[in-house]
Image (cartoon, rainbow, N blue to C red):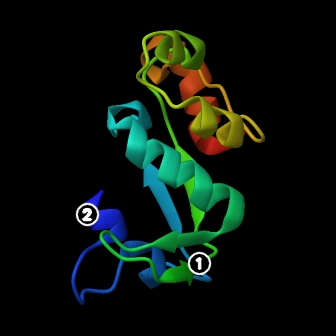
């Protein structure tokens, strides 16, 4: 989380990407649940606080998250925050693994056909 929220005087990634950036978080379930809940609050309100600070900072960074398994299974295993899932489930995209796609279908996808 330090690269996202940063400590001390360094500008946070959420601030650097404000107004024009997209942050992709691969396997978001690997973040601890407290961090996932803070991420859910940021997605909902667009406001974050630096680590060990009460100062609120706003940002409108687009956030894209991926999970490695079915989200329901991850929540049952207590690896995915219910709050984060609720926020992320507002807009979702489910894709099969590219490894399971037919070669021609993959080429069509790449070329935009």
Give the camera-side residue of 53 and 32. Answer: 53
The local secondary structure at tag 1 comes to loop
Q: Residue 41 appears at what percent x and percent y? A: 60, 55
Q: Is residue 95 above or below residue 52?
A: above
Q: Please tell me the numbered disc located at residue 2.
A: 2
Q: Quadrant of the N terminus?
A: bottom left
Badge 2: few (under 14), some or many (20 or more) residues near its Cα, within 10 Å? Answer: few
Q: Residue at x 48, y 27 (%)?
A: 80
What is the C-alpha distance between the residues marked 1 and 2? 17 Å
Specify the quadrant of the image occupied by residue 59: bottom right
Q: Is residue 104 above or below residue 26?
A: above
Q: Which residue is mark 1?
A: 59
Is there any visible trace of residue 26 in the rendered image? no
Q: Quadrant of the C terminus?
A: top right
Q: Residue at x 52, y 18 (%)?
A: 75
Q: Earlier in the sequence, mark 1 or mark 2?
A: 2
Give the camera-side residue of 18 and 110. Answer: 18
The local secondary structure at tag 2 comes to helix
Q: Is residue 20 above or below residue 65?
A: below
The residue furthest front is 54
Q: Residue at x 48, y 23 (%)?
A: 98
**Left or right: 61 with respect to 6?**
right
Badge 1: few (under 14), some or many (20 or more) residues near its Cα, within 10 Å? Answer: some
The tally of labels here is 2
**Left or right: 84 with respect to 91?**
left
Q: Is residue 90 above or below residue 80?
A: below
Q: Residue at x 40, y 43 (%)?
A: 34
Q: Residue 24 appears at what percent x and percent y? A: 46, 53
The residue furthest left is 8
Is there any visible trace of residue 77 in the rendered image? yes
């Amino acid at each position: 989380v330090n690269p996202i929220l940063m400590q001390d005087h360094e500008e946070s990634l959420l601030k650097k990407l404000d107004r024009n950036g997209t942050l992709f978080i691969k396997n978001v379930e690997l973040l601890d649940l407290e961090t996932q809940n803070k991420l859910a609050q940021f997605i909902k309100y667009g406001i974050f606080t630096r680590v060990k600070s009460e100062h609120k900072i706003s940002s409108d960074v687009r956030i894209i998250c991926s999970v490695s398994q079915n989200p329901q299974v991850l929540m049952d295993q207590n690896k995915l925050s219910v709050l984060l899932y609720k926020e992320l489930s507002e807009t979702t995209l489910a894709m099969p693994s590219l490894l399971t796609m037919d070669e021609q279908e993959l080429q069509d996808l790449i070329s935009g056909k």
